[in-house]
Amino acid sequence: VHDKVREAAYNLIPDSDKRQFHYHLGKALNSICDGKDVGDIIFLIASLINHGKEWILRDEELSIAFAKLNMKAGKRALDGCDHKTAYSYLEAALSLLPQQHWENHYDLSLRLNFLMAGAAKSCCQYVEAEQMLRKISERCRCFEDKLSSYYLLSQIFLTQGRVVDAYDTCSFVLLQLGETIPDLVAFDDVKTMAKDTLTMYQEVDDDDWLERKMEDETFHTKLQFYTSIAYSSFFCKSYSLLVYFTCKAVQLSLQKGICEHTPLSLLQFTGAVANTDNAVLCYRIAKNALSLQERFDVAAQVPELYNNFYGRFAWRFEPFQVCVNNLRRGFEIGFSSGNNYVGLLCALQVIKTKIITGSNLKSLLNEIDYY
């Protein structure tokens, strides 16, 4: 009965006034909830307020306040892997910014445009995401502000199969950060480099090293781009360069401490250099790398971590079913988080492992159709 009464009262409002009614209702809710963690209610508040765009744009202070509100809603949707919803709220937030927002509200503009590019990537709007990231790079006031955009751009290139563009982007950034990017590396040289890196690891007291955090953000960035360039070099360069980049990344962590990019760098390294002679040591390193998940927020990296550990290495030591289950989880997390290309790599590893273990081919074909 109450619902019918409310519906009847709402229908008495002229259609021309309904948008303004929604807007004022949203403003009232926002003022009541201001400063509180309202959870998913933020989506309702932002949606109601967005009905009043024509009135919001007349007041710059309101424009900024409600752009931030929509950005908060978009970020919450991104955290919940609801990429289309995130895209819509972030798009609304951008539309509310005043004309000179880059000049007058630089930090907000940078953050909002980057989130929008990430949402566009997750929605497979790669062209739009790339355009936004290039726009960000043009507007940034310093090279450090461009780094996140360059990294996301490299991931977009990898997702599209543009591995040379991904490699060139990472190479450019690492050179700017003072690293050396060789055109070629002799096989004997990287063989020695890999052996030296394993020795460095053995010489480190694991417990002591695992407690040392990498303090300098510049080294965090270098390690992040080394993991990306290593991945792209696997497809467009040589095995020697792949080993070179993974060794450089691990040596950086061994010297400077661990960070959120250390687990992936260790797993890439063990996957690249493991052989019959060093398999046990590499497995120990890889297990330590996987255990670091508990120390850092690496949820977005889980598909890559599982692809490298369970797909390339763990099958030598762990039950096949454990590998299959975790690779399937990597696939599901990859697709739910917008990391589609790594999710598909996990699926390929599932198929390969099931073929090796003699799975029923008919049921395997159905599983392939699902993927």
Image: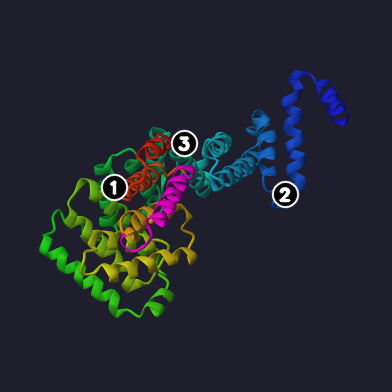
Q: Is residue 283 shown above or below 330? A: below
Label 2 belongs to which residue? 34
Give x and y (percent) for residue 228: 32, 52
Checking the image for residue 325, the label placed there is none
Q: Tell me, yes or no, whether the highlighted magenta stretch contains residue 260.
A: no
Q: Tell me, yes or no, whether the highlighted magenta stretch contains residue 335.
A: yes
Q: Quadrant of residue 98?
A: top right
Q: Is residue 198 shown above or below 178? A: below
* Quadrant of the image containing the N terminus: top right
219 left or right of 3? left
Read off the magenta span: 316-337
Name the residue nearer the viewer: 18 or 304. 304
Q: Mark 3 and 2 residues: CB-CB less than 8 Å, in contact?
A: no
Say whether disc 2 or disc 1 marks the residue closer to the N-terminus: 2
Name which residue type carries label 3.
Cys
Please name the predominant secondary structure of the magenta segment in the image.
helix
